[in-house]
Image: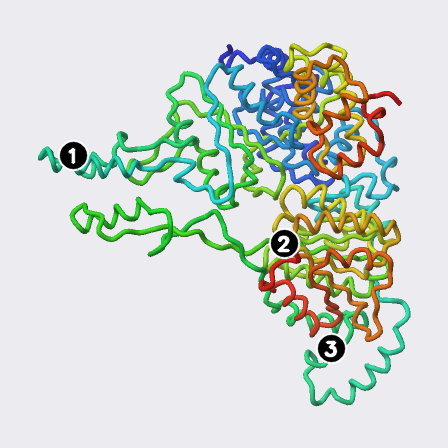
Amino acid sequence: MSDRLGSVDLAEVVAAFGQLLHAAGVPVTPERSGRFASTVTLARPATVDELYWAGRVTLLSGHDEIAVYDRVFDQVFRGVADVADWRGQEPSALAPPPPTGRARPPERGAAAPEHEGRGRVAPRLPRPAAVPPDRERGAAEASDLLAAASAEERLGHVDLAVLTDEELATLRHTMASLRWATPRRVSRRTVRHRRGRPLDLRATLRRARTTGGDPVRRTFRQPTERPRHLVLIADVSGSMEPYARAYLHLLHGAVRAARADAFVFATRLTRLTRTLATSDPDLALRRATASAPDWSGGTRIGAALKTFTDDHGRRGMARGAIVVIVSDGWETGDAGVLGEQMARLARLAHRIVWVNPRSAGAAYQPLVAGMAAALPHVDAFVSGHSVAALDEVVAAIRHAGGGPRR
Amino acid sequence: MAAPGDVTDVDTMQRLLDGADYLSDTGLATALFCAVRLPQPLLLEGEAGVGKTEAAKALATVLDTPLVRLQCYEGIDAGEALYEWNYPRQLLGIRVAEATGREVTEHDLFGPDYLVERPLLHAIRHPGPRPVVLLVDEIDRADDEFEAFLLEMLAEAAVTIPELGTVRAAVPPVVVLTSNRTRDLHDALKRRCLYHWIDYPDLDRAVAVIRRRVPAASATIAEQVAAAVARLRSLDVQKPPGLAEAINWVATLDLLGLDRLDPAAADTTLGSVLKYREDLELARERGSVWVAGGA
């Protein structure tokens, strides 16, 4: 390519810009860079703005990449931002708006300056600092029984909050084997069937060839059924932190096995579906932790649900779906907002399952204002505090009889 | 109005779109320019009512070619998107042949006479000389399997019909896909497409678009409504009103013979912009004086 933009070689500029974008997290392929170069050749942009649009139209593939593109473009072509200007910021100021989150965090991001920035506020998933006293007691008792019970059985009833990372790893197999299934709904898609309503002319005629052109045996079409969509929204705020690691495994399993959509929130909502969709659970979990920057912050359930409904639910993700919310209902914002948002979500979704691991205690009462506000809109309320109790969660999701609350 | 080759640069595209009564910004004009000249399918996303579908229609007007529209929905399949054999007619053909003692072969029955063209095939078989504009509307509503089916068409501008063979486009169509982002599209599909996100227009452009669309409306009312819609968007509404709603609102006011947006008029016609009860309540709480720009 010999076209020149001023005195600079076009191919070089395009390639370098593409690499910068790629390092910042926008997956730019050589194919796209090629399109960018062709567009520059064709349209001969005279202003920086025109160049901006030529690049934006050809290099990106989604709305969530625009913010990153803007930043890199400004840095390269407008000389606005110096690398140092945004190195120390919260990723939230750089990353695209909260609902979608970063589709792809940089994988081999060593070269990406942003990576350093992330490192500073790198979200973590630590073990609770103080091990609850009952855990020590429980562990001591359990050690006596070790000979009899397999590790998995033994751990099955231990509260998820007190499991060590190693124990959690042992249970991964059990969690992966949960049988995810959602109730089915009638689809618009049809299949051939002996009985049914619309006549399948294509198949009937084909069969008619064997009977001399007379359609003796008729074939019909019948609507198929398909599973309802499953959406899991998990609270990873401070109060839920002990359960967060375990539920991330659960989210991973659901995304892989039931093509569910997964979100986490503390102060803001982050979509993890894509991050969790890889087959390697460790890698997926590492990436998930990296892409939810507000891990273990305060809880704003109402605001997070609003973001979910506005950006995803209303567009179709929650319509007729099974929505599972994992949270202790400890709302630091306005509980009234949570009630409103739950009502809104309840009108969209087929069923809402609320999983509250803190509700396992015998004396549990939903006294937390947030939980009380949310409960009227919930179809099933389960604890899911241990691996054994996760069966309840799966059963609540599968539950088809009785229909929704309406 | 113009052959694809005549659209020499982005400015020209913008001017031509203007001539087709579609006011675009540099971004959209660049996107459409690339779609026509590269040529490459263009994926348009944006909130409902920002003019995604209108953009494709305007492009067809600019190129002076037919617009072929495929509205997607769940369960759409090849029979509805590509082609279908006209079975009743085939049956009749057999009967007529029997009655008149004429010979009828399978070759006759599965020939072009009995083929029902659906939008995709129609776009591919367009003889030219100018390309048709193929609008695949709301692709996110179709099943993801359907996207895979679209890929051959997008990449090769060709479709394969078992009985007839591969039909290749004499002039590849200019393809515009729109999506409301109800679900993620496949990477394979996105990879083949240019991408443009249409934002809400700024106030000046909104006024200009409204005046273009409702010529009977006065400048005052267009400005008032554009400002009011921008105000309503700033409220925490569930469905932020777009350009389409603004145009509807002006048309409603015009129909009622109102020449300005005062609080009373705003209150009675609010239903043409806000379509959720909660949103209406929110706006009424804020006060129709505020909506009308009073205070």
Q: Chain of mark 3?
A: A
Q: Nearer the viewer, residue B185 or A28?
A: B185
The residue under label 2 is A350
Q: Is residue B271 left or right of residue B87?
A: right
Q: Secondary structure at mark 1?
A: helix
Q: Nearer the viewer, residue A46 or B141?
A: B141
Q: Secondary structure at mark 2?
A: loop
Asked which colour scheme the image uses, the reply is rainbow
Graded by Cα atoms within 10 Å as few (under 14), some (14 to 19) or many (20 or more), the crowding at tag 3 reads some
Placement of A274 over or under B161, stated as above or below: below
Report whether residue B9 is seen: no
Residue A403 x/y as whole percent: 60, 60
Question: Which dot marks residue B96?
Answer: 1
Same-chain check, marks 1 and 2: no
Q: Chain of mark 1?
A: B
Report whether residue B91 is seen: yes
Please, which residue is most extreme toward the left here? B101
Q: Are marks 2 and 3 in contact (CB under 8 Å)?
A: no
Q: Secondary structure at mark 3?
A: loop
Question: Which dot marks residue A157?
Answer: 3
Quadrant, the C terminus of chain B: top right
Please state which of the two labelled residues, at mark 2 or mark 3, is closer to the viewer: 2
